[in-house]
């Protein structure tokens, strides 16, 4: 943290402008060495026009922003060079910075310094990454909510409540002779634990819902061969993405496509027809199809409405019995022979020749996932898998506290688990952390962040 780092903050390639960011104690001095104006005399938060130079050679015409600590993203002195876009120019300026006292930043190091200097917490740091990588409007709203610290505030309040409880327990244990302090018994602890359990459970649920908003809903299209799965995908995407023929088993591999529906991403996966086969390549496709069923948030099982259920259909029904699902009965222009009473779930009738039923199918998906409620909620959520694991650990400890109260364990024994919950919540927001945790969190960031 005592050195000065530099990196390209914009995507490397042809463009109108590239931005190179420098942060650290010598950032102004190092940039001044290669700039035609005297940056050392510039006021904070000002922009200067000039040229980047290599000795006497002018490299590029640029704008240089000077921002002195602590009112910067990293709370260090920060300089940003806005140069003409292009790989050669941008790399040349970065190379000059590295030759004049700067070190190439590690992935996410600017954000890591912002955290270590108290500018943001771990949840806000994760929100920065989310905001950079968002793919939909609803995901952007989620990320900006966490960037404003809403989830952190909620967790800090719970930690304060736990700390007050721990302090009261300690006083009761150490000074039992005092009569003017509030007596803390198992019943009072039980009430507070139930409240915290409910709030943490809500954050955990929101975290799972937020994944759907950020990454999209994964929808596997399954069925036996030649029932119209690929045709259904093409109609939904409104393009011929999957190969369609009358030959059963044409689809051997996974074909994917994404649409945006009311601000939500829907990731459709057309799978190979599921059946018993001796063809080794088709076997591999069937295996992948079964894996996609396990990973999917929703399964669309496609059936021909003009055919009775086959043994292969019944096997697939067994494979998806525990999944959230919709049944798509294709070829509704032909005489119906399928027994719908054997299908336990929502049914939509379609005709992929005319696109009939596609809008109804999409509306059913909206209803299943309650799009209106998802998009209107102000989520308190965690997006990092390790943070979610910590939260699940807290909920497990809360259950152990409640079990201990039920079994009338001594309050000082119960306090041990309460302290563990308090510590784990601190790790989630970064009140306590390890270098290993930070390295793991920030390694997926791009260099300029």
Image (tube, grey):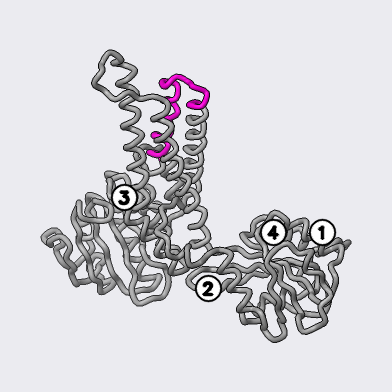
Do labels 2 and 1 touch, CB within 8 Å? Answer: no
The numbered dot on residue 293 is 4
Return the disc, 2 or 1, that comes first in the chain's sequence: 2
Cα distance in 3D space between marks 2 and 1: 32 Å
Q: Nearer the viewer, mark 2 or mark 3?
A: 2
* Residue 360 seen in this snapshot: yes
Q: Which residues are magenta?
A: 404-427
Which residue bears the numbered disc 1? 315
- Per the model, the C-alpha gap separating discs 1 and 3 is 52 Å
Q: Residue 241 location in percent, x, y? A: 66, 77
User: What residue appears at the point 42 percent right and 22 percent down from the top-left corner?
Assistant: 411
Q: Quadrant of the C terminus?
A: bottom left
Q: Earlier in the sequence, mark 4 or mark 1?
A: 4
Q: Residues within 10 Å of mark 2 (few under 14, many from 20)?
A: some
Residue 270 as seen in the image, left or right of residue 311 = left
Q: In this orientation, which residue lies closer to the viewer: 327 or 186?
A: 186
The 10 Å Cα crowd at callout 3, few under 14, some 14 to 19, many 20 or more, is many
Residue at label 2?
A: 261
- Say whether residue 428 is magenta: no
Q: Secondary structure at mark 3?
A: loop
Residue under the point 48% across and 62% down: 374
Tag shown at residue 120: 3
Tell me: 23 left or right of 412. left
Overall secondary structure of the magenta section:
helix
């Amino acid at each position: 943290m005592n050195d000065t780092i530099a990196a390209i903050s914009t995507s490397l390639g042809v463009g109108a402008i590239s931005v190179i960011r420098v942060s650290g104690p010598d950032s102004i001095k190092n940039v001044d060495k290669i700039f035609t104006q005297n940056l050392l005399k510039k006021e904070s938060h000002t922009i200067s026009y000039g040229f980047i130079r290599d000795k006497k050679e002018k490299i590029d015409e640029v704008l240089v922003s000077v921002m002195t600590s602590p009112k910067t993203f990293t709370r260090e002195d920060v300089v940003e060079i806005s140069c003409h876009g292009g790989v050669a120019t941008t790399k040349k300026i970065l190379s000059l910075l590295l030759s004049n006292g700067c070190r190439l930043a590690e992935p996410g190091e600017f954000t890591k310094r912002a955290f270590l200097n108290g500018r943001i917490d771990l949840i806000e740091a994760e929100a920065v990454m989310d905001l950079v990588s968002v793919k939909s409007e609803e995901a952007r709203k989620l990320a900006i909510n966490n960037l404003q610290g809403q989830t952190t505030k909620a967790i800090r309040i719970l930690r304060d409540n736990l700390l007050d409880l721990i302090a009261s327990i300690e006083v009761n244990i150490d000074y039992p002779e005092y009569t003017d302090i509030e007596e803390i018994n198992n019943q009072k602890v039980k009430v507070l634990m139930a409240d915290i359990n409910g709030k943490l459970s809500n954050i955990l649920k929101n975290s799972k819902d937020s994944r759907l908003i950020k990454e999209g809903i994964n929808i596997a299209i399954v069925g036996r061969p030649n029932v119209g799965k690929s045709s259904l995908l093409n109609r939904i995407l409104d393009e011929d993405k999957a190969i369609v023929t009358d030959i059963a088993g044409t689809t051997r591999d996974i074909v994917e496509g994404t649409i945006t529906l009311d601000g939500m991403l829907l990731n459709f996966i057309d799978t190979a027809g599921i059946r018993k086969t001796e063809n080794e390549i088709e076997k591999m496709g069937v295996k992948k199809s079964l894996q996609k069923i396990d990973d999917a948030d929703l399964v669309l099982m496609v059936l021909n409405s003009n055919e009775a259920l086959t043994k292969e259909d019944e096997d697939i029904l067994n494979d998806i019995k525990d999944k959230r699902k919709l049944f798509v009965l294709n070829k509704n222009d032909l005489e119906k022979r399928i027994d719908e009473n054997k299908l336990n779930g929502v049914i939509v009738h379609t005709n992929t020749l005319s696109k009939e039923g596609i809008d109804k199918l999409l509306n059913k998906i909206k209803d299943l996932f309650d799009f209106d409620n998802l998009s209107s909620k102000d989520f308190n959520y965690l997006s990092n898998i390790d943070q979610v694991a910590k939260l699940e650990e807290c909920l497990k400890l809360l259950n152990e506290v409640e079990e201990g109260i039920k079994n009338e364990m001594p309050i000082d024994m119960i306090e041990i688990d309460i302290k563990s919950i308090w510590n784990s919540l601190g790790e989630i927001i970064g009140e306590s952390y390890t270098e290993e945790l930070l390295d793991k969190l920030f390694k997926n960031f791009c260099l300029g962040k």
